[in-house]
Amino acid sequence: MIEFTLWDILRNLLLATRWTILLSLVSFVGGGIVGLVVMFMRISANKAVATAARAYIELFQGTPLLMQLFLAFFGLALLGMTVPAWLAAGLALILWTASFLAEIWRGCVEAIAKGQWEASASLGMGRIQQLRYVILPQALRIAIPPTVGFSVQVVKGTALTSIIGFVELTKAGTAVTNATFQPFTVYGLVALIYFALCWPLSRTSQVLERKLNVAHHNH
Amino acid sequence: MGYQLNFGWLPQYLPVLIDGIGVTIYLMAVGAVLGCLLGTVCAWTRALGPNWARPVVVAYVELIRNTPFMIQLFFIFFGLPSLGVQMSELEAATLAMIVNLGAYSCEIIRAGIQATPRGQFEAGASLAMTPFETFYHVVLIPALQRIWPALSSQIVIVMLGSAVVSQIAAQDLSYAANFIQSRNFRAFETYIVSTLIYLVLSILLRQVLAGIGWALFPKRKAAR
């Protein structure tokens, strides 16, 4: 029987952490791009487009991420593709992230006072110009803290991809547990690694929020 | 051409799905009630409790909020037995839900408590209320009313997150889906059905929570 030192366990977990980080980045960036499109659809003046975006958000926020992962995994296979786990994982996480970011950002756009829309309209700006020059620059400021805060959910969401066989931190934790029979140590370390990834993001979000509030009160 | 969707298996496996739905609802109900209770106690401790207990609550909340639910579940189910704490799958799943929601609801309820003006405490004391009565009537109930929408969304998120408990073989709805697809080899259709059930559950849950909010806080004006 092979003896595993704490360093053996930690080293293997840290190697797998790279995939957690990569998948988080891909999901967050991809989800941001799709989320931006959905957000624009959601605030569109066209009723049908806005309703479609609402249905999308309702669907992805109202169902478990785990089910979305399974559907991506088995659904893509129906199209006749061999689906590697990373593809299904990335796709599901991007779509899931997009639904939350779209709704967060919509809240930020709608938090901009109505007078800003009216003022820019009175300057003869079209809708695109209004968004580009007046609304979005202000919305962006208040959007940063909740967006950073949501990135924590994305990192934690990647843990579920282990279930469809993507080898990241959680999957590595299970594999190492099966080799070492030390679930307490291994899952404890896994939790600490997730904490080390997520806590700085949470703190940043809180600090930014506080800073923004101070700036807000000065007006 | 292509693949034909087939739902012919549905009647045969309906009882399995219904059992799964029952367990999911049980987990959600017990988790929500006890989780919010734990969250309230923690929020009280953080806002008004003894000094030594505050860092403990902060550590608990931060640790839970910054780690995945699945890891908490694995730690409780696989990790704790080495300390001599043995649990069934369902007990471990329930405990994980309570601990998870406890941390999130603590933060939400604390935000509501902090919004209570200082004068309200003093007003309560001047009416000869005990600290507990003041906390309950003057602080907690208006706070809950203020944060009820945020708490409701968190409960829905935790309910959806409970799908993961199938990974320790707690027999909830997602476990039923896994079981069925391993028998009928119709994975896509099975997960479509279970996903739709989750969607209906989350919509219903939101309605129920809105109704509870309505019943709990009748015509009370929130202190602003």
Image: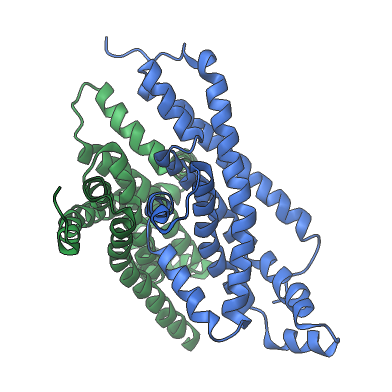
Chain colours: A green, B blue
Image location (x, y in percent) of residue A97? 35, 50
Give A115 or A51, whichever is nearer the viewer: A51
Residue A112, compared with residue B182, is above or below; it is: below
In the image, farthest residue toward the front: A1
Task: Looking at the picture, tell me which residue is in the foreground, A13 or A4.
Answer: A4
Quadrant of res A210: bottom left
Q: Give x and y (percent) for residue A78.
A: 28, 22
Q: Where's residue A7, x and y in %?
A: 16, 64
**Extreme residue toward the right, this view:** B127
Residue A44 seen in render: no
Quarter of the rendering occupied by the C terminus of chain B: bottom right
Q: As drawn, is A67 to the left or to the right of A91?
A: right
In-image side of B190 versus A162 (left or right): right
Say which quadrant the N terminus of chain B sits in.
top left
Say whether residue A36 is left or right of residue B85.
Answer: left
Give above or below for A2 relative to B197.
below
Q: Residue, x 35% and y 49% (percent of image)? A: A98
**Residue under the point 55% across and 56% down:** B98
Residue B36: percent from the left, percent from the top? Answer: 62, 60
Mark yes or no: residue A183 visible: yes
Q: Is residue A57 left or right of residue B219?
A: left
| Total numbered badges shown on the rendered structure | 0
| Residue name at image x 33 percent, y 66 percent | A195
Between residues A128 and A125, which one lies in front from this camera angle? A128
